Image (spheres, coloured by chain):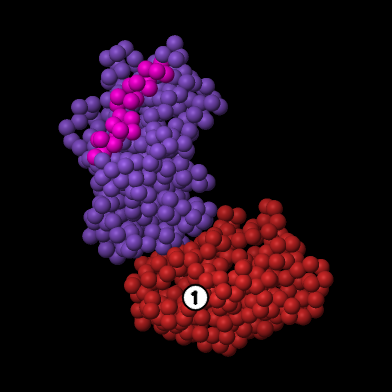
Chain colours: A purple, B red
């Protein structure tokens, strides 16, 4: 059922935060390429950028709490041929600086990597002011912007290294809480190429970010109930691997999309567009439905907003019944 | 035409500006005419330019960033007259499929432009990033920027100003086009900037003032700004100009911030400006 090229285990014993995968990935990218530089708006510890700062102090720029300026500085650093990573929370990486990203980075075709931590409701107790759920949509709408949303520590490390090697602006989204480490550190990772984590012909589950692990759990529960899931890990929201999604949807005719993001403008909307054009299917959306977040623990919030394995199981059963 | 004959070049640039804006039936002649001397002296005399063809990274070159992108006509004219692209291309300004977008952009690959500008307040940050890149690379060249005075109402300018002083970036010389006008009226009536010299000084910058229509005065502040290298302090030049300078009926009025002359007004304007290098 599960593809061992990608899956390390279905019984993970270790949990790590994806932001730490960014931290190790940034350090590795910095060691591999002296053009890699980093900027941070007063959240160096939260973004796990300390190791890069300590290893390459001359290539690290503390900008203070001034995110708009940070985005412009990053755009300017590319003009000398450098590869800048900006670091702050996802909310302050997108909504706060949308026009700076749009004009100085995306429209100007600058090779900036926007590293965005603490995305989604799993940011937890700080509440809705900090829990952005619209970021992937905003970034995906910008022409030329690649949008990465890795699933665990190992994949965030790989995505960070890949972002440094990719030429062009990248939005790299990850999170705060410790989550199971379930993907192989040496799994093939290619921007724009979905990972086919499990093979089945009954229901397609398309998941991204923290919800990929929830989808793995859901796949096991559904297998016990006789439903075979075709599971796609969409670590790249844009460019979307439309071919993989359409191939799977054409076989199953039943699709569930799971993401820690608003339903409007998220992965679900992109999958629905692809399926409507190429493989008309019944689709269920496991996402936040036009609400703001709130304070709570990450686990409480995932439950409260219906972003977990149980919700994916229910959605898969609904969509399967509807197509049989 | 000798490159040091700056007044003659400026006259042709002003003709280009009013003809481009008239040809597009839109655009921003006022600020463009007011900054003609500065861009002429920078590109024809002061800036160290080496790359042929244009090199985006600008290693070993002085760089210029136009933060108030709406005065694109003056920049396009100076770039074309300096040889960055064919002068004839000025006729395509603001027209479909042109490299000369209404506001400067890189997407069409216009030589000389390194970042899009138009949404105000962003250029100082980008220029400082380029200055950081030069510092990392051991490149001693200078980064010049131009901003409108109204543009200083944008908060990002002051974020960037703080960053430059804190990080001792002394390879930047920023000009503020102090024409006292913005779209809706005089800056003092819309949102007064207060004592600008004191503001920049309080933000840690070395402050100079200049007459933006006097080449010798501009030469003086450019040299003085460059000489600040090693001081650990960025330099700003508060440059007094008249919006619409060189065309009598446009001079000093915010009406001509973003309005194109009609056929009769164009003829009146051109009669005041000598054709020194040949019209495009």
Does the stretch in magenta take in B54? no
Q: Is residue A229 in view from this perspective?
A: yes
Task: Tell me if residue B262 comes above or below residue A286 in the rendering.
Answer: below
Q: Whole-percent x and y of residue B97? A: 68, 52
Residue positioned 46% across, 46% down in the render: A139
Image quarter of residue A185: top left
**Pick the front one: A243 or A249:** A249
Does the stretch in magenta take in A319? yes
Q: Whole-percent x and y of residue A175? A: 30, 43
Q: As drawn, is A114 to the left or to the right of B102?
A: left
- Tag 1's secondary structure? loop
Task: Tell me if residue B181 comes above or below residue A322 in the rendering.
Answer: below
Residue positioned 47% across, 72% down in the render: B143
* Chain at tag 1: B
**Pick the front one: B104 or A138:** A138
**What residue span does the magenta drawing correspond to?**
A297-320
Residue pointed to by mark 1: B193
| Furthest residue toward front | B189
- Name the quadrant of the C terminus of chain A: top left
Q: As drawn, is A286 to the left or to the right of A281?
A: left
């Amino acid at each position: 059922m599960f593809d061992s090229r990608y899956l390390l285990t279905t019984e993970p014993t270790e949990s790590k935060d994806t932001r730490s995968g960014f931290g190790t990935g940034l350090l590795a990218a910095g060691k591999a390429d002296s053009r890699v530089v980093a900027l941070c708006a007063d959240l160096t510890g939260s973004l796990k950028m300390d190791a890069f700062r300590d290893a390459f102090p001359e290539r690290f720029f503390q900008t203070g709490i001034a995110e708009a300026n940070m985005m412009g500085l990053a755009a300017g650093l590319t003009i000398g041929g450098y590869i800048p990573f900006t670091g702050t929370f996802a909310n302050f990486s997108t909504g706060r600086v949308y026009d700076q990203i749009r004009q100085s980075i995306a429209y100007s075709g600058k090779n900036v990597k926007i590293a965005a931590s603490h995305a989604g409701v799993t940011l937890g107790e700080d509440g809705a002011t900090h829990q952005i759920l619209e970021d992937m949509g905003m970034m995906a709408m910008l022409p030329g912007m690649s949008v990465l949303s890795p699933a665990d520590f190992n994949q965030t490390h790989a995505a960070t290294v890949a972002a440094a090697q990719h030429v062009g602006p990248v939005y790299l989204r990850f999170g705060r809480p410790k989550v199971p480490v379930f993907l192989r550190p040496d799994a093939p990772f290619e921007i724009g190429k979905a990972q086919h984590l499990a093979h089945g012909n009954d229901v397609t589950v398309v998941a991204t970010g923290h919800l990929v692990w929830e989808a793995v759990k859901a796949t096991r529960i559904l297998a016990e109930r006789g439903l075979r899931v075709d599971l796609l890990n969409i670590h790249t929201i844009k460019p979307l691997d439309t071919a993989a999604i359409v191939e799977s949807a054409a076989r199953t005719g039943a699709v569930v999309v799971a993401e820690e993001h608003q339903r409007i403008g998220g992965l679900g909307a992109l999958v629905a567009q692809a399926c409507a054009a190429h493989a008309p299917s019944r689709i269920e959306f496991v996402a936040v439905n036009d609400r703001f977040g709130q304070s709570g623990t990450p686990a409480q919030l995932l439950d409260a907003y219906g972003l977990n394995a149980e919700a994916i199981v229910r959605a898969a059963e609904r969509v399967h019944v509807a197509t049989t | 035409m000798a490159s040091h004959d700056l007044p003659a070049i400026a006259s042709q640039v002003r003709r280009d500006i009013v003809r481009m804006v008239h040809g597009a039936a839109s655009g921003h002649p006022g600020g463009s005419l007011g900054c003609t001397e500065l861009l002429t002296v920078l590109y024809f005399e002061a800036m160290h330019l080496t790359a042929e063809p244009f090199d985006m990274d600008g290693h070993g070159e002085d760089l210029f960033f136009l933060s108030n992108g709406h005065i694109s006509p003056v920049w396009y004219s100076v770039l074309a007259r300096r040889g960055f692209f064919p002068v004839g291309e000025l006729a395509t300004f603001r027209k479909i499929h042109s490299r000369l977008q209404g506001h400067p952009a890189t997407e069409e690959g216009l030589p000389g432009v390194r970042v899009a500008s138009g949404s105000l307040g962003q250029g100082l940050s980008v220029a400082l990033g380029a200055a950081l890149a030069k510092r990392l690379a051991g490149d001693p060249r200078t980064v010049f920027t131009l901003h409108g005075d109204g543009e200083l109402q944008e908060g990002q300018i002051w974020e960037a100003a703080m960053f430059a002083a804190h990080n001792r970036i002394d390879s930047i010389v920023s000009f503020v086009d102090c024409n006292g006008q913005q779209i809706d009226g005089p800056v003092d009536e819309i949102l007064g900037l207060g004592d600008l010299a004191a503001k920049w000084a309080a933000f840690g910058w070395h402050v100079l003032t200049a007459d933006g229509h006097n080449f010798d005065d501009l030469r003086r502040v450019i040299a003085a700004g460059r000489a600040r290298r090693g001081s650990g302090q960025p330099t700003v030049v508060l440059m007094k100009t008249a919006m619409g300078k060189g065309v009598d009926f446009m001079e000093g009025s915010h009406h001509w911030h973003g309005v194109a002359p009609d056929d009769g007004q164009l003829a009146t304007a051109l009669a005041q400006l000598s054709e020194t290098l040949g019209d495009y």
